[in-house]
Every structure is written in C-alpha cells, then in structure tokens.
Amino acid sequence: MLGGDEFISSPPRKTVRFGGTLTDILLKYEKGETTDFELLKHQLSDPDIKDAQILNWLHEFRASVAYLTKELEQLVSILLKLPWLRRSREVVEEYLGFLGNLVSAQTVHLRPCLRMIVSQFVPPRITIREDDVDISDSDDDDENLSENFNTCHRALQTVARYVPSTPQFLMPILVENFPFINKSERTLECYVHNLLRVTVYLPTLRLQILELIIEKLLKLDVSTPQQDIEDAEETANNSDSEEKSTEEGLFDMEEDEERKGNKVVSSSSERMAHPLAERLDILMTILFSYIKDVCHVNGKLDINNTKDLYRDLVSVFDKLILPTHASCHVQYFMFYICSFKLGLAEAFLDHLWKKLHDPNNPSVIRQTAGSYIGSFLARAKFIPVVTVKACLDLLVNWMHKYIDNQDTGANAYCDVALHGPFYSTCQAVFYTLIFRHKQLLDGNLRKGLSYLQSLNFERIVMCQLNPLKICIPSVVNLFAAITRSKKTIDPFYQFWEELSAEDLENLKKPIKRGTSEDEDDDFLKGETPQNDGVVGIAPNSYESTTRSPVSSIGSPPDCYVPYPQ
C-alpha cells in the first residue's frame, strides 16, 4: 500500500472507461452533447462501482473543479453520494482531497458537502426483514463505525480549513439532522457524541451545540413523567423475565462499569426499563463524560478550560433550564461541573441568588432560582457547612426584610401570585435545613441550636404571609435515586438522613439557662407550630415517600412552590 505522500503524487490507476477526459465530457455537455455526460452520471451512480474507477474519476474531478459550477449541481450531488467512507484508504484520501478542492473553488457547494458529512454522524441504515415486512434500522454492528466517524471529522476539518465561514453554515445543518427521539438509542448516542466532538475543533460552535443538545434532552425529560419511569422500573424489578444487557457506549467511562479484578462486568440492572428514560440516561452520561474530559487534562483539573465551559453551561442553564417547568434530570449537568471545584459551586449559588433577589426578573424565574438554591445547598455534598450557613444567613435576612416591607402593606396575606419569590426562598431554606440539620448541629449541639434560633424562623413561619401553607411540598422523586447515570452524581449527592430516636430525644431536652447561648430552642424542641410544619415533614413523609427500586433509599419530598395558575 502506498504512503500518503506517495499516493497523492502518483498518477491514477488505468481502468477501462469510456469517452475522453472529464474536461472533454464537460465541455461537450456545455455545447449540448449530453451522451457522454449521461454515461458519466450512470457510472458514478453504479452501486457496484469499483475502487479503481472511483480513484480514476476523483483524480480527474480534483483537477477540474473549476468546471463544477452551480449548473452542474446534479453531478456534484451524485459525487457526494459516492460510497467513499467504506472504501480503501486510497479512495478515502482522494475523496478528502476532492472535497477540499471543491469547496475552495466552488463555495456554492459548501452546504451540500456539509450535509453529506453530517449525514454520516449516525450508523448507516439497513433493512431487516421481520414477518415478511421490511424494517429500516441502524446498523449497530458495523465494526468500522468508529473509524468512519473519525474520517467524517477529518472531512469536516478539511472543509473548515478551506472555508473559514464553515461554522455559520454548519450549525443549521446540525440542527436539521438531529434525530427524532424515537430513533434507536445508538443513533441518538452517536449523533450527540459526534456533535460534541465538533466542539473540539470548532470551538466557536460549542455554546450553540450545547444549547441544541440540552434542548433535546429537555424535551426527552419533560415528556417522560417521573411516575412513569418509576412504574416501569418497579415492573422490571418485579418481573422474572431475563435481564437485558446494557448497550455498549461510545465512551469507555469508569462510571459505566463495575470492575472485579481485571474483569469488567456491566450491570444489566443499570439499564432503564422505560425506553425514553434509557435514551435520556445514555445521553446524560455522554454529556457528563464530555464535561469531565474538557475540564481535565492528563487527569488534572484545568482551571481555564473548566471556567470557560462553566460559563457556557451557565448560559445554557439560564436560557433553557430556568424557564422550563417540570424538568427533573437535565439540570444535573450544572451540579456535576460545580462538583469539580468549590469556587464554581459558590459562583453558581451567587448567580442564582442574583436571579432570585432581582425584582426586574420575571417572578417565575425568581421562584425557580430559589428552588435551585435550596436543592443545591441541600443535595451537594461538596458544599461545606460554612458555605451553607453563609447562604442561609443571606436568604433568611432577605426574608426578614421582605416581611418588614409587607407588614404594613395591603398585600400582607398568603398569595403565591403576589409573593412567589418569598415562598420560594422560604422553601429553599426549609429544604436546606431538612437535609443539613445534622451537619449544622454536629460538633457543638448548643452552638448549633443557638445558630438556628438566631435565624428567627418563628417570625417567618408565623408571619401573615403564612409560608407553611404554601411550602409544604408534594412528593417529587429524585433524579439520582433511579438512573444509571446516577453513578456520576452519587459521590457528590446528599441523601436525607432520618433522625434517630436518640437524636430526637436530645433535641427535645431543654437546654439549661446560663449564658446567652443557653436559651430554649423553640424551633426544634417541638413546642411551637413550626415544628409540625417544617422539621416534622421529614420523618412524617419518610415512609410515604416512594423508595427507589434501584437503591431503596427513602427521601423526603423535594420542595417546590406551585406556579401561579
């Protein structure tokens, strides 16, 4: 086999062919003589065309691209349909050279070239005959699939090198070609993987590509009710049917495998029973893997790369996640990247806080930001207690000021439409307390209780706005408890821990008076109404909360503020 430089400089192989040179055929066509031209199209369209014939023609076409004007777009279309990917290395290299020559000389053909390349981002279609019916499906068993994808990206880079404006023409094509969610898991997996690969060598498209992918994930997310996922998981777990094996992914992720010695064992129980949930889970895992790979270089966190990606993901979060109601899973991409460094988590909390307390933002955005603050503080193991306390101080002080401003006003009554951001903030604080109470009290019970008392929850829950009436939550099942991709999140995720009987007794015991820190804690010892309305919702709702069929871990309901109807 000839080397790359040898091949490019060598003359084309001699083959049996008709007529004169390509230039002669094209010149005759311009004069109205179409016989040879039609024969040319016929030979190029022959499904049994040989490598030698393709090489011969491509070599001539590379030298004649000046003739391939818009008037010959039909001929160019045939050339772009040539089965070049699954041919010899010589054909592939010659075709890549042809693409470069074509787009540099005739930019009118740029879009068709890009469409041809992007169409190869998914497995080829094959026809399977079942019960005398022809069914079209993706060829998941193509051994050369990975190599073909690599070649496609080489082709795209070649085109982009010759035409600097390629990104602006490429993005609409990437959008148009995104597979429907009912396509095979492998098709979706390959396409998303290849989109993310494009961001590596066309970084100007990264934000738009992330928006596209996350927008599609959101559609999957909101169209897959959480209860349906749980029902499917429960049915699958109770079934005696044979377990299905998990589909091999494009990334060799440690999170996707269980290692026993030197043997890798895939857990079939990790496959989601609900088909749309399984698609979502696969794509989320790819996104997590991409985030990890971008942020780490040689196994170490690269601060600059991480900050750049964080900014893009925050932008996508603001544009797509915050305005979307009923998203349960997709938002965890922010949770994941923030786990890499505390500074990112604190920056994200500050970002949400600015959204929440800015009166110029729509009320629904402020409410959602408040809910995310509560969930983030409650659930993120990587956020230390000192940061939790700082956020609680910030939120509670704002709540007290809000109450001050409402006490003498005409709107000092319970109404979500009027006070949505306030209720969302209350709920964020209550939710954080439910999950973090052990850490807040750990080490020095007296000091911890004094801190909680200093927050003056009694005033908040007893105010005329009556937050307990709004903020007692319905059961919202948790993302991390049921997915396969939960392995990526679990190490950083704070599950709720029920107080032991001994803990409860200790909290009920009065603290002896002596110093200013020894005052009775009316909030936690169970003698005031807020005990039933806030802390009490955790143990009381524990048994009624749906347990995960995978982990069997109970959890209190996630807090949320109802949207105004």
Image: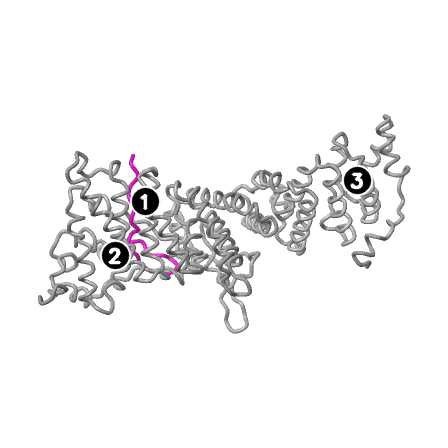
Q: Tag 1: residue type?
A: Leu
- Marks 1 and 2, how far apart in space? 19 Å
- Quarter holding the C terminus is top left
Tell me which label, 2 or 3, sits earlier in the chain: 3
**Element under disc 1:** helix
- Quadrant for the N terminus, please: bottom right
Q: Does residue 531 appear to the left or right of 317 in the view shown?
A: left
Eye-nearest disc, 1 or 2:
1
Q: Which residues are magenta?
A: 544-565
The tag on residue 473 is none
Residue assigned mark 2: 433
Decide if residue 329 is on the left or right side of residue 191: left
What residue would you read off at disc 3? 44
Q: Main secondary structure of the magenta part?
A: loop
**Which quadrant would residue 113 be assigned to in this image?**
top right
Quarter of the image where one finds residue 401: top left
Q: Secondary structure at mark 3?
A: helix
The three-letter code of the residue at mark 3 reads Leu
User: Dividing the picture into quarters, in which one does residue 141 lie?
Assistant: bottom right
Distance from label 2 to label 3 (Cα)? 70 Å
